[in-house]
């Protein structure tokens, strides 16, 4: 069993601090002292598929772990209380200084994201996005660079995360575009 799995990381009850925080086998833990019941649920994340005027897909290079230096789609976690649609607009502005003017749901896939030695389960939501202009594009936040790729020219093993590989494949297999 991986050392990053929740049952190997979560040892103490977050409510009372007891060391009797027991995995229950149904994605949950329960404290034997105070009764607090905690479920391991999926966190929401967004990914943007942005196509330029040459029908090329915009991919970023990760500037941080996990997968530092690997290809990725721009995006990130949805904040508590935030709509996924608002998160994709915010993330693209933060990471690439681009203004999303339109978006459309494309597909979603489950993923596992290791952060600080803890496995976070995510549902990665892919949006096909249109931006006002590419003129102001710059790598910011946790992005170290970006590149545009054509269908058939991607080495999928260079893409960080199974869900991101699946979103890129889905786009290239189904070829949707925003009008």
Image (spheres, helix red, strand yellow):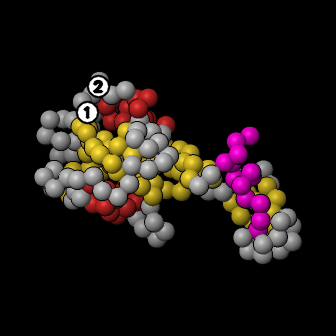
Q: Nearer the viewer, residue 121 or 2?
A: 2
- Position of residue 120 measured from the top left corner of the image (x, y, whole percent): 58, 52
Going by the image, does 156 lie left or right of 15?
Answer: left
Neighbours of disc 2 within 10 Å: few (<14), some (14-19), many (20+): few
Q: Nearer the viewer, residue 63 or 147?
A: 63
Q: Say whether residue 138 is magenta.
A: no
* Total tally of numbered discs in the picture: 2
- Position of residue 9 measured from the top left corner of the image (x, y, whole percent): 71, 55
Residue beneath disc 1 = 149
Residue at x 63%, y 53% (from the top left corner): 118
Going by the image, does 25 lie left or right of 153?
Answer: right
Structural distance between the alpha carbons of marks 1 and 2: 6 Å
Q: Are marks 1 and 2 in contact (CB under 8 Å)?
A: yes
Residue at x 22%, y 57% (from the top left corner): 98
- Image height of 117 relative to 93, above or below: above
Neighbours of disc 1 within 10 Å: few (<14), some (14-19), many (20+): some
- Image height of 121 relative to 59, above or below: below
Give the residue furthest to the top: 152
Q: Nearer the viewer, residue 56 or 110?
A: 56
Find the magenta span and give its range. Answer: 1-13
Residue beneath disc 2 = 153
- What kind of secondary structure does the magenta stretch mostly adopt? loop
Disc assigned to residue 32: none
Going by the image, does 88 lie left or right of 132?
Answer: right
- Image height of 133 relative to 166, above or below: below
Residue at x 23%, y 53% (from the top left corner): 138
- Position of residue 151 measured from the top left corner of the image (x, y, whole percent): 27, 28
Q: Nearer the viewer, residue 72 or 51?
A: 72
Q: Secondary structure at mark 2?
A: loop
Rendered-image quadrant of the N terminus: top right
Residue 107 visible in the current orientation: no
Residue 52 visible in the current orientation: yes
């Amino acid at each position: 069993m991986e050392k990053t799995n929740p049952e190997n990381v979560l040892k103490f009850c977050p409510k009372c601090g007891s060391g009797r925080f027991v995995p229950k086998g149904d994605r949950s833990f329960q404290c034997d002292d105070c009764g607090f019941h905690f479920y391991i649920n999926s966190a929401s994340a967004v990914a943007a598929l942005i196509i330029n005027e040459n029908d090329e897909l915009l991919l970023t290079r990760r500037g941080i772990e996990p997968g530092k230096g690997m290809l990725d789609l721009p995006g990130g976690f949805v904040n508590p209380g935030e709509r996924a649609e608002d998160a994709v607009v915010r993330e693209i502005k933060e990471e690439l200084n681009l203004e999303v003017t339109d978006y459309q749901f494309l597909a979603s896939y489950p993923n596992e994201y290791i952060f600080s030695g803890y496995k976070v389960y995510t549902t990665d939501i892919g949006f096909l996005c249109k931006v006002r202009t590419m003129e102001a594009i710059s790598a910011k936040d946790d992005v170290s660079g970006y590149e545009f790729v054509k269908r058939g020219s991607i080495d999928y093993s260079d893409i960080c995360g199974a869900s991101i590989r699946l979103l890129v494949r889905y786009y290239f297999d189904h070829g949707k575009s925003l009008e």
